[in-house]
Image (cartoon, grey):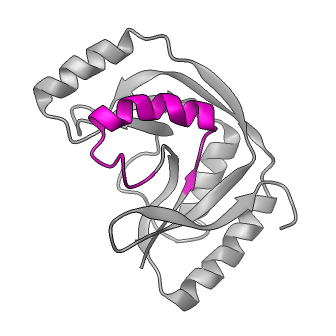
Amino acid sequence: MKYGVVIFPSKKLQDLVNSYRKRYDSHYALIPPHLTLKSAFEATDDRIKEIADQLESISKKYKPFQLNVTKVSSFQPVNNVIYLKVEPNEAIEGLHQALHDNFFNDTSDYAFIPHITLGQNLSDDEHSDVLNQLKMLNITHEEEIDRFHLLYQLENGQWTVYETFRLGKEQ
């Protein structure tokens, strides 16, 4: 089964992001707006229990932190993804690092750029038009993050929460 680890922002930010995702993101119906800490990976039922225990240990090492969204940006020319840029901080980078170096013992295919996707799988022309439009918006947002989530993928492609981990707290 496929699993992943994400941070879900507040409903307020999710509503804003979804107002664009429903038009520009082909994965809109599959997963709510999120910041990916560990992209999709395969695990057995037995292994996922071990992973959940490790995630619980990791969550206790980090305190709640501020998530700051500062602007609209894009991964072009690598791919046509438009996103809200999340300012990196020690907690986000530490969580990402813990899930790659000390935990899964793997490296990511891409440099870690904290973000929340607004649009993807757009044609070059559509990407250019939408990006220029969204860059004119003054989107800034700040909120406290106090948890992250282990998700699993259903047979229909949708993602749902397997377990939630509160930062800095005994479970």
Return the x and y of residue 97 as percentages of the image width and height: 59, 55
Instruction: Establish if 57 lies above or below 135.
Output: below
Q: Quadrant of residue 140?
A: top right
Picture mark count:
0
Instruction: Establish if 23 lies above or below 110.
Output: above
Return the x and y of residue 60 as percentages of the image width and height: 81, 61
Task: Please indicate whether residue 21 sits to the left or right of residue 115 in the image.
Answer: left
Return the x and y of residue 160 as percentages of the image width and height: 51, 64
- Residue found at the far right of this picture: 170
Residues 36 and 154: in front is: 154
Task: Report the residue at 61% width, 37% height from top.
Answer: 11
**Quadrant (top left, top right, bottom left, bottom right) of the N terminus:** bottom left
Task: Report the residue at 36% width, 36% height from top.
Answer: 21
Task: Please indicate whether residue 73 sits to the left or right of residue 62 in the image.
Answer: left
Return the x and y of residue 84 as percentages of the image width and height: 46, 29
Q: Quadrant of residue 55?
A: bottom right
Bounds of the magenta segment: 6-31
Task: Report the residue at 27% width, 39% height from top.
Answer: 120
Instruction: Establish if 75 lies above or below 73.
Output: below
- Residue found at the far bottom of this picture: 46
Residues 113 and 102: in front is: 113
Task: Report the residue at 56% width, 26% height from top.
Answer: 69
Task: Please indicate whether residue 62 sits to the left or right of residue 158 in the image.
Answer: right
Q: Does the magenta portion include 99?
A: no
Instruction: Establish if 147 lies above or below 115.
Output: below
**Quadrant (top left, top right, bottom left, bottom right) of the C terminus:** bottom right
